[in-house]
Image (spheres, rainbow, N blue to C red):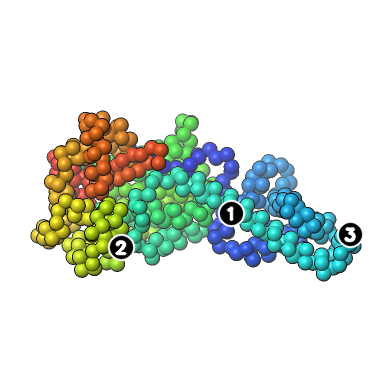
Amino acid sequence: MRFCAIVCADCRPKRPFFVYNALMSAITQEELQTAVHAALVQWGKPLDNEPAPLAELLLVQNQLAENGEKRQFNVKHAVDHVLLETVEQLAEQDETGANVLQSRFIDGKITRQVAQDLHASIDQVNRWQRAAIETLTQLFYQQEYKLRAELTHQLEASLPPAPYSQFFGFAETKQTIVAQLVQTSAPWIVVLTGIGGIGKTSLADAVVREVLPSLVYKQLCWLRVESQQFSGEPFPPERTYHALLSALAAVLWPDSAVGQVETRLSQTLKATPHLIIIDNLETTAHVDYFARKLLAFTEPTRFLLTSRARPSGETAVYTQPLHELPFTDAAALLRHHAQVTGLSELADADTDTLQAIYQVTGGNPLALKLVVSLTAVLPLPQILTDLNENRVGPIENLYRHIYWETWRTLTPTAQTLLQAMPLVASSGARPEQMQAFSGLDADDFWTAVRELTARSLLEVQGTLQERRYGIHRLTDTFLQTEIIGWPDELDV
């Protein structure tokens, strides 16, 4: 059993990370201007236990971290320091306005004194002051927005590649889960459940990408369970759990041996908020065991789990079951997938045609994509007739039929490459590794890659500079049980 771990882009960041609310996505420039004005008025004054204006800005928090070891340096000092630096920046584009702010708020002069110093009327000074505060606010907003965008980009870059080119459906569910992950109270463990191919991993990815700009979390760790099987039986939950802890420790402290793993993890995860995604837990026993044990590491850290099995209800977790897509979303997915795979005729098909596909496959995203890929080589009426004849029974019968039809329509070289893919971890393999596993020469290998990708059987991962390829868990199970002949049932 292995865990594939994806973590924040730099586990040893050059810039300190902090806990913040979603300020820049929730505050308007008008509200920020009010806070800037308040900070100017409070320059150099004690706060009397009131929160310092601008204290939640990343600019301020980073300044506090840089000077945190200095005695008597507190949040108010950090606000004043950043405020002064920004007034100095203002002077580069509005020297008069910067002088007015310096005199009025930092030097503490009344408006009449400033007017006398500048040989201007009181009304003119007031106009200069209003304009200067507006520009100062814009400078704050631009700097804060840029800093937040950089940190968000760092976190997004740490995610595994999105398992979809465009996300369809689950709009209300996605917003519900986002709300669970950004609040400051329980639940600390959220579980997405549903049958194989329903889109649990895709939804988790979409949710995390929407949460990241809030900068609620210091670090992101994505752990995918590679395998929980031994001789056809699931690994005991305890073994899977300890493998998880080891993988998480290796992620957080990659350059050091970690003793007392649970103690150190508890200290770290309770001190700073992490979002940890554990993808592909297998059984109810595993989910229940993880939920009980992981509570020791929560608050402020939160866990997002995906599993085909639902928790038993004995543990304090928020469970969100996923159901099939409604027809509108399924039709949009069908058209999109047909378009990106070059099947323009199906992409432009009428509603009745798409409805016929939906009737036999249901709204399971993976089944829909596989059926679309079959239309590249088989006439749609034949596909639908065969599916109707094999629709009786549990959903695994439908999958088994679709996979067999797909297998029979592949070229021999594509079959050879696909049959080698169970040797590849779910995190994917580089092309040279896949070619070595398959034994194909370069020309045949790349021809097979293009064919399998077009048929939705290879999942493209990695970056633009380094592509990796993997297969869906259900594809892997079909190959092992039906093609290679390893004894087991097709598990969804």
Mark 2: few/some/many CA within 10 Å (<14, 14-19, 20+): some
Secondary element at tag 1? helix
- Which dot, 1 or 2, sits closer to the camera? 2
Mark 2–mark 3 distance (CA, rounded to whole Å): 67 Å
Q: Earlier in the sequence, mark 1 or mark 2?
A: 1
Mark 1–mark 2 distance (CA, rounded to whole Å): 34 Å
Front in this rendered view, residue 161 or 277: 161
Relative horizontal placement of residue 270, taking residue 452 as reference (left or right): right
Residue at the spot of label 1: 145
Q: Amino acid at mark 2?
A: Ala
Quadrant location of residue 27? Answer: bottom right
Front in this rendered view, residue 386 or 131: 131
Mark 1–mark 3 distance (CA, rounded to whole Å): 36 Å
Q: Earlier in the sequence, mark 1 or mark 3?
A: 3
Mark 3: few/some/many CA within 10 Å (<14, 14-19, 20+): few
Residue at the spot of label 2: 332
Quadrant location of residue 32? Answer: bottom right
Front in this rendered view, residue 353 or 480: 353
Residue at the spot of label 3: 117
Q: Position of residue 128 (x, y in %)?
A: 78, 63
The relative height of residue 478 versus residue 390 in the rendered view (above or below) is: above
Q: Earlier in the sequence, mark 2 or mark 3?
A: 3
The relative height of residue 23 versus residue 277 in the rendered view (above or below) is: below
Q: Residue at x 20, y 62 (%)?
A: 357
